[in-house]
Image (cartoon, helix red, strand yellow):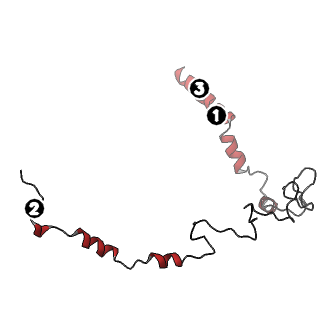
Amino acid sequence: MKSDISDSDDEVIDIESDVLEVVDVDMDIESDVSELDNEESNIETGIPEMDTDTFDIETGIPEMDTDTFDIETGIPEMDTDTFDIETGIPEFDEGDIETETDVVYSDTRLPENVIPVAYRLDFYTSYSYIYFHTLVLLLLLLLLLY
């Protein structure tokens, strides 16, 4: 059996020169590292640096804005003008709120003899409609058999 690999020295491929040609492309690792912004991450550790204005440097815990948080409990303070203090439910002035459906139904008036589409769809999918058609089909079947 013949082997596909030739033993002659003339056909030996110089792998080392091919690798060097590929690697020799303009790659300068040190210049790429120096282009990183020192404010975004620490080059030595790779850990993003924290903004010292919003984080406590010693603990690493975010500092809370004392204007919107209760310092003792850490619970956000609610604006008492828009929230009921006892229940925590937002208060709305019902006179000022106007929804799209209010506008549509106030501008559109249907004649009295027109049944709204939603009512008709509800009837056709209801139990009474299915029961009615089943009863009619049974009566027709009885008439045909009689």
x then y, percent, for residue 124: 66, 41
Vertical placement of 56 versus 2: above or below?
Answer: below
x then y, percent, for residue 122: 69, 43
Give whichever of 5, 119 is nearer the camera. 5
Residue type beneath disc 1: Ile
Q: Which residue is drawn at 15% across and 67% down?
A: 12
Spatial CA span between label 2 and label 3: 94 Å
x then y, percent, for residue 25: 35, 78
Vertical placement of 110 versus 143: above or below?
Answer: below
Spatial CA span between label 1 and label 2: 89 Å
Which is more foreground, mark 1 or mark 3? 1
Q: Residue at x 34, y 73 (%)?
A: 23
Instruction: Name the residue furthest left.
Output: 1
Residue under pointer 2 = 7
Which is more foreground, mark 2 or mark 3? 2
Q: Which of marks 1 and 2 is nearer the N terminus?
A: 2
Residue 130, which numbered label?
A: 1
Q: Residue at x 76, y 65 (%)?
A: 56
Spatial CA span between label 1 and label 3: 12 Å
Residue under pointer 3 = 138
Looking at the rendered structure, the secondary structure element under dot 2 is loop
The answer to whether the residue labelled 1 contacts the one labelled 2, judged by CB atoms less than 8 Å apart, is no
Q: Which of marks 2 and 3 is nearer the N terminus?
A: 2
The answer to whether the residue labelled 1 contacts the one labelled 3, judged by CB atoms less than 8 Å apart, is no
Give whichever of 100, 12 is nearer the camera. 12
Q: Which class describes the residues within 10 Å of circle 2: few (<14), some (14-19), or many (20+)?
A: few
